Image (cartoon, rainbow, N blue to C red):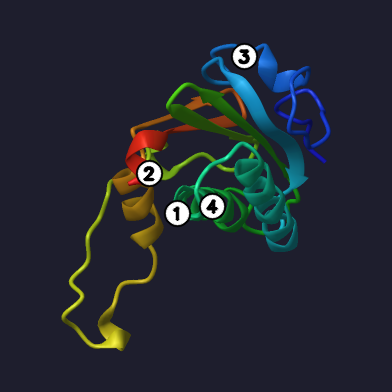
Amino acid sequence: MPRSPLPRSDASAGAGNAASDATPERGPQGAPIYTQILPATPDCVRGTLAKVVGALRAIGLTRHATELIELVLAEALNNIVEHAYAGPEAGEISLAILRDGPRLSLTLCDQGKPLPGGTLPPPRTARLDVTRSELPEGGFGWFLIHSLAHRLDHRRSGNDNHLLIELDLDTLEC
C-alpha cells in the first residue's frame, strides 16, 4: 500500500490536527473543519461525504451551501477513486477542509495516476439538445467544479497529486 500523502489524523471537527499547520503542500491556512485519510473506495467516499455534511452543518452553513460543497467534494473524490486509482491498485486520499473567513478550502492529496496532460480538465459544456444515447460520458463533474469554485489549483509533486478547491461561502449561500 502506498504511503499516506499527509500525516495520519482521525476525522475531526476541531483544532489541533494535521490540517491546522498548513504548508503550501497542504493548502491555505485557516480554521480546520474536517480532516481524514480515507481508502479510495466508493463506500468510503459515501461515508466521508456524510461526515463532512455533518461537520459543515455544525459550523452553521446553510443546507444550500452544504449541498453544493458536498456535490463539489463528491465529484472530486469520485474522480480520484475512478481515475487516479483505476485498476487493482488500492490507495488513500487525504482530505482537509479549512475555513478562512468567507473562503472554504478543500485540499485533496493522493498517490494515484497523474492527470492526463498534468493539468485539470477544462470546464467542458455539452450539447444537451441530443438524445440520451448521444450525451458524452463524463466531463460534467469538472464543469460543476469549475462553475462553483472560486479558485482551483492542481500540481503533481513526486508521486503525489495535490488538488485545492477554494469556494466562496458568500456566493454559495445565495
- Label ID, residue 70: 4
> Tag 4: Cα neighbours inside 10 Å, few (<14), some, or many (≥20)?
some
Do residues under tags 1 and 2 come within 8 Å of each other at their CB atoms?
yes
As shown in the figure, which amino acid type bears the numbered disc 3? Ala
The image shows residue 39, relative to residue 108, as above or below, that is below
Image point 58% across, 58% down: which residue? 82
* Residue identified by numbered label 3: 22
Q: Earlier in the sequence, mark 4 or mark 1?
A: 1
> Tag 3: Cα neighbours inside 10 Å, few (<14), some, or many (≥20)?
some
- Label 4, label 1: how many angstroms apart (C-alpha)? 10 Å
Image point 31% across, 72% down: which residue? 136
Q: Earlier in the sequence, mark 4 or mark 2?
A: 4
* Residue identified by numbered label 2: 172
Q: Quadrant of residue 8?
A: top right
Does residue 121 appear in this view? no
Q: Nearer the viewer, mark 1 or mark 3?
A: 1
The image shows a total of numbered marks equal to 4
